[in-house]
Amino acid sequence: MDTKFYKSLYRIRRVEEKIAEVYPTDKIKSPVHLSIGQEAVSVGVCEALRPNDVAFGTYRSHALYLAKGGNLKAMIAELYGKVTGAAKGKGGSMHLIDLEAGVLGTSAVVGTTIANAVGYAYGLKCRRQDSIVASFFGDGAVDEGVFHESMNFAALKSLPIIFICENNSYAIHTHQRLRQRLLNVCERARVYGMPAERVDDNDVLRIYERVKSAVEALAAGRSGPFFFECMTYRWKEHVGPNEDYHLGYRTKAEAEPWIKSDPVARIGARLEPGVRRKIEEEVEAEIAEAFAFAEESPFPDHAELFADVFKQN
Amino acid sequence: MDRILSYTEAVREATDQEMARDQSVIVFGLDVDDPKAVQGTTKGLVEKYGPERVFGTPLSEDAMTGAAIGMALAGLRPIHVHIRMDFLMLAMNQLINIAAKSHYMYGGQVHVPLVVRSMIGKSWGQGAQHSQGLYSFFMHVPGLKVVAPSTPYDAKGCLIAAIRDDNPVMYVEHRILHFQKGPVPEALYAVPPGKARITVPGLDITLVGLSYMQVECLRAQRYLESRGISAEVIDPIWLSPLDMETIAESARKTKRLLVVDNGWTTCGASAEIVSQVIERLQGISEVRIRRLGFAPVTCPTTPGLEVCFYPNSRTISSAAYDLVCGEAKGWLPEERADLQAIDFKGPF
């Protein structure tokens, strides 16, 4: 279990560090919202899901995409704007998709995919399919009306969906306490009629265990939805590869406990050094290959501009 | 023998027949399962297909539109019904940012077969927020199809085409058109996107009437006939994709084009039609052009002012007459009983 979790966590961390490293060269033609520091949430949740379950995410979804099994080469090529990308270079970092892996889409407009995830869960229920939907969003989305409307409908129809609020305390640079009087998001979820639980230590194993119990309950026929608020912390700036403590909206001191309890390092420390090294070497080779693939891939042909406006029936 | 159905009966029948044909078609929206069943357009469907496929929703246009998109992604073919087009303003994020864009921004991997029905109101004090014809908002955005059928025949055929389309379709109704009656075949048929219809052939002027204004243009054609003017009337039916071939060809022939919109003219459907006609015909044929639409104000409730807010068959006739004569003649036909507008009478 530890090796699997470590591989996923380390892989996401290193992919994003590599993105941050390449970013100043301008080869990546897409705004990037890095998940560094928040990987445990995606990994814990996605390890608890089954392969036929699906996930909807946000513009900060590199971690979700990779944790759910999204194709790494297609993701990097997408960031490079290449035709071999996950969306042929037309979506970029904020609109990642991998249908085979069950990554159904991510959106730049905060909160938007919550409703899409709820509708998808309704569709699954109507079509008597066994899958479960995981809907990822941040504490900023909780400000949006669509969050509340979606919670209400999901509870009303007892849908097979698990809501994952990745609470990193900030909507861009504005702290949750400046946006909301009640800081416990779980309390809000409960009033719509669903069980809600907070995992406050960014611990991948605890997130995994708690979400796993919800997945099992839904798989056993218990009615949804379930709600989890996972407390976490973004190390980098809202968008881009750098740190932003100089802006003054948060302090390095606030970040330090989160950085000290880095979930990647925590799991890594539990492994035999030899096992750990082998995982890291495999991941590094895979990442190098993915970036080379993106570099070598061509940009889309100009005719591609007009493709896929409408699906031809 | 042609059966005669009302517009609402045609909408109901199209929905019923498509739901029977295809298990993945579902209908929801405010009040679709209540006793009035949205002017009868969803009457009997919940009894026939059950509450999972036909249901009234919470008053959550934003999330329910997002949910409709999610359902479409999961393999259903949802029809989301709005009793007022004005309420669509609460659903714009999902319609513009997700429904219109998903197929493109995900590289063609997903599609959103969604129908959004909405209704424009008129008369009996509909006022500021029950009267807006906002379809040009949706025509502006790539990835959405827009249709505004004006007859029961097209109401059925276009709804069937919309349901079967793999893309999001904004299906725009008009409350006054709901009372129209006309021939509607019982069999399933589609009136496909991108084809306009010449509803009356003519030689002297082209009248393009959108949505309810098609009815007023047909009345104007009769007034003009009494002055010896032969108007060709066109119903675009589908506003996106728009059949510019038919409209431009008619304008080339008649050399006079009057576009009458059931909305404001500024940046509206009429602006688009006129621009495209000019782009196609400049240097080839000189065409005199005029547009009519809502007065550039908020729709007032009082009938005393509402009467000047909308174009009607007589003001259309007057404008058309001036266009044909090439100068302002100030002719306004005496109202004829057989060409009187039948407005909504209430009680609401």
Image (cartoon, rainbow, N blue to C red):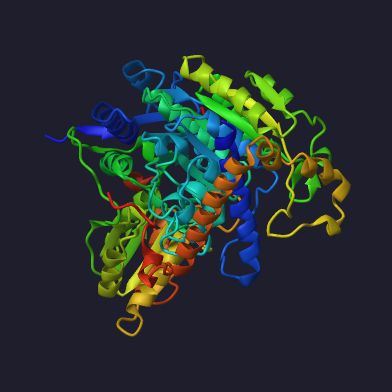
Furthest toward the front, the residue is A274
Q: Is residue A312 visible?
A: yes
The N terminus of chain B lies in which quarter of the figure?
Answer: top left
Q: Is residue B38 visible?
A: no
Q: Is residue A207 above or below residue B329?
A: above
Q: Is residue B66 above or below residue B144?
A: above
Q: Is residue B49 left or right of residue A246?
A: left
Residue at (51, 62) in percent of width and height? A291
Q: Is residue A40 left or right of residue A88?
A: right
Q: In x, y percent, where is residue B309?
A: 54, 52
Residue at (68, 59) in percent of width and height? A240
Total labels drawn: 0
Looking at this view, is B24 or B195 the one in front?
Answer: B24
Looking at this view, is B73 or B143 the one in front?
Answer: B73
Q: In x, y percent, where is residue B323?
A: 38, 72
Q: In x, y percent, where is residue B85?
A: 50, 42
Looking at this view, is A233 or B347 the one in front?
Answer: A233
Residue at (35, 44) in percent of width and height? B337
| Quadrant in the picture for residue A303 | bottom left
Q: In x, y percent, where is residue A170?
A: 76, 44
Q: Is residue A272 above or below residue A17?
A: above
Furthest toward the left, the residue is B1
